[in-house]
Image: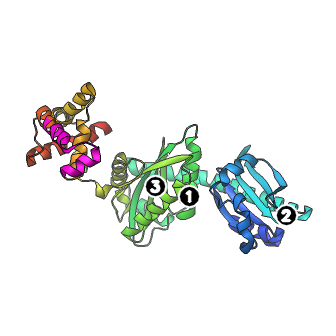
Amino acid sequence: MNLSFENRDIEGIIYSLSKLSNSSVFLLDGFLNLICYNVIHTNNFNRFSPISPFNRKFAKFAKRLKNYTINQELDGSYISFYPITINDKDIAYVYIINDSKLDKLSQRTIEYGISIISAKLERDHATALAQARINRTLVQIMLNSKELPDEFYQNVELNLNWDIKGYIYGINIRLHPGKDRNINNCKIIVYNYLDHTIGKNNYLSTSKNADVFIFIKVPRKDDVKEYVSNMMKNFKSYANIFTVSVGVSNPYQHIKSIKRYYDEANLALLFSNQNVIYYSSLDTIKLLYPLKDYEVVEQYYNNTIRKLEEYDNKNGTKLLETLEVYLKYNFKRTLVADKLFIHVETLRYRLNRIEEITGYSVEDPEGLFALQMGLKIKRLIKIK
């Protein structure tokens, strides 16, 4: 057993446990999501489907287990379930499926392997906490210091293995926990994913409230879109625990510009509605953002869009929604009417009322521009 487990990572230990016990062995995280596994006799595995971690209904089944279980007969197979506990909290589970009962030797082998996994997880958790503290300190120093020597930035990049050519991005991940979900547990899931995909020491990060901010370096500009897309797919498997909104900065070649891509990712995130927004995709809104505190900007909003909001609230109408759909579908009245489920004549009446209330005509380019700017400023006012 010692030879089988010696110098193995967690995936290697799961593989060894599976071979030594001649069982299909699965490692699940604390939220019953699959981390790694090894399946014995894959050609016969289909009959395990109802109790397989690959089955979408497995989570409901596993929630009924949760406790230490040995050789429970189910659907012609035998299952065993081992919680891995650190500081009185279940952080992972080992789940085993076999054609026959585990004998005493197999049970002792599995329990020994789990003790090694537990020690590794506890060590990794402590290391991750220490690294997170270092990361936060480095980020705060760079964000809040006006003058730092070039050697400081060079050493940071060397420690992150960023000595290769590429592009640095800031990514702000905002967590939206489900009901009664702990935000710190959600952050652990995020950091576990980052460690697994980027490498524990290959990115910078900091966090505040529900935001996890990371800095990564990729060889090509297009690589960041692929990475973020894969990240979002992974987080969708935790939809019952949390969802995310993501803002991504422009690319930079030097970490010395960290304040700029921190701000850009933050600004992009403000316009994300539980999806991904790239700073480069923002139009005139990013030009208007520095003006958000100016009184004249708020007055512009008051003279355009706010009039529609107040009229809708008072009369139960939908003029603002009508305007937004009208602009979204490029003024194509038949299409807009279909999207709003109204008659074209009703749409015409609403557009006339918009002109009467705001003083800007949707038939006039200047009027359309004024209303479009009013909508953009409305978003700024909301952010403010």
Which numbered dot is residue 214? 3
* Placement of 2 over or under 314, stated as above or below: below
* Placement of 221 over or under 269, stated as above or below: below
Q: Nearer the viewer, mark 2 or mark 3?
A: 2
Going by the numbered disc 2, the residue's amino acid type is Thr
Q: Earlier in the sequence, mark 2 or mark 1?
A: 2
Spot the residue most to the top.
Answer: 314
What's the colour scheme? rainbow
Going by the numbered disc 3, the residue's amino acid type is Ile
Cα distance between the residues tagged 1 and 3: 12 Å
Pointers 2 and 3 in contact (CB under 8 A)? no
What residue does disc 1 label?
193
Spot the residue most to the right.
Answer: 104
State which quadrant residue 118 falls in.
bottom right
Q: What residue is at 19 percent from the left and 42 percent from the top?
A: 347
Q: Which secondary structure lies at badge 1?
A: helix
Which numbered dot is residue 109? 2
Name the chief secondary structure element in magenta.
helix
Does any portion of residue 4 appear in the rendered image?
A: yes
Q: Residues within 10 Å of mark 1 (few under 14, many from 20)?
A: some
Which residues fall within the magenta stretch?
A: 331-352
Does any portion of residue 284 appear in the rendered image?
A: no
Going by the numbered disc 1, the residue's amino acid type is Tyr
Q: Position of residue 252 (x, y in %)?
A: 34, 63
Decide whether residue 339 is among the magenta residues: yes
Pointers 1 and 3 in contact (CB under 8 A)? no
Q: Position of residue 15 (x, y in %)?
A: 73, 69
Q: Which secondary structure lies at badge 2?
A: helix
